[in-house]
Amino acid sequence: MTSTIIEVFPQRIQKSIVLPIAGSIFLALLSKISIILPFSLVPITGQTFGILLLSLLFGRNMAFFSVIFYILEGISGIPVFAFGGGAAYLLGPTGGYIIGFLIASYIVGTLSDKGWGKNFFLCLFTVVIGEICIFLPGILHLLFFLPSNKILTAGLFPFIPGEIVKISLLFISYPSLWRVKIGKGSYINRK
């Protein structure tokens, strides 16, 4: 007889450790979906999709700790970031975006905990706030690597079409996942 994660780990352990670690692994996998742009120091990855999805589904605490685990894995040398791992990675060109992941997970997760993920327009507003939380620190951090007149063309504008696609995928998949989350006996349900 096989056991599921629900049967093996008590719900408290699932919420505090197992699901955030699973979330960090999900982010690591999405970091490997990357497109290198020849004119930018920052690749297009699937991580923003993952941050927003986890934050909406998991809420503030589990999403925030998923990102904490992800960053700790990366700075410990595990190659979970788009181009590898190591403590110096956060000081590189993509470090600001990674810090933005942490901010976005906290803010989007908090808004999701308040029910903003249940309404299409509030959810869209929440996701846009999350995008700003990711891109603003990323762009500001790029100022250490690029002249200010190149920041938006290297750190924001090329990513907008991809972010629109990711947000569309999020809105296609999220309603189904929300039903799983709030279903009877759901192990993701935060209440």
Image (cartoon, rainbow, N blue to C red):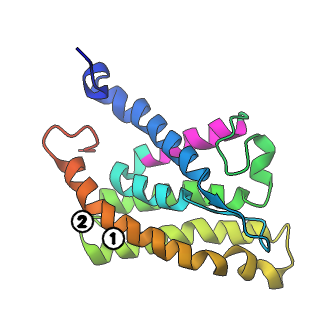
**Is residue 29 left or right of 183 when viewed as pictured?**
right
Q: Amino acid at mark 2?
A: Lys
Crowding at mark 2 (Cα within 10 Å: few <14, some 14-19, many 20+): some
Say which residue appears at 21% left-offset and 40% top-offset.
Answer: 186
Locate the N terminus and report the quarter of the image it occupies.
Answer: top left
Amino acid type assigned to the residue bearing label 1 in the image: Cys
Q: Where does label 1 land, which residue?
A: 123
Q: Residue at x 72, y 64 (%)?
A: 36
Residue 51 part of the magenta-drawn span: no
State yes or no: discs 1 and 2 in contact (Cβ < 8 Å).
yes
Which quadrant holds residue 34? bottom right
Residue 179 in view, yes or no = yes
Secondary structure beneath dot 2 equals: loop
In the image, the segment drawn in magenta is 63-75
Q: CA distance from mark 1 to mark 2?
A: 7 Å
Q: Position of residue 60 (x, y in %)?
A: 41, 51
Q: Is residue 2 left or right of residue 54?
A: left
- Vertical arrangement, residue 8 with respect to residue 122, above or below: above
Residue nearer the viewer, 147 or 165: 165
Report the residue at 52% width, 39% height from top.
Answer: 25
Q: Element at badge 1?
A: helix
The outermost residue toward the top is 1
Crowdedness near tag 1: few (<14), some (14–19) or many (≥20) residues, C-alpha within 10 Å:
some
Q: Main secondary structure of the magenta part?
A: helix
Front in this rendered view, residue 191 or 6: 6
Judging by the rendered image, the residue that carries numbered circle 2 is 118
- Position in image of residue 179 (x %, y %): 20, 54
Q: Quadrant of residue 189?
A: top left
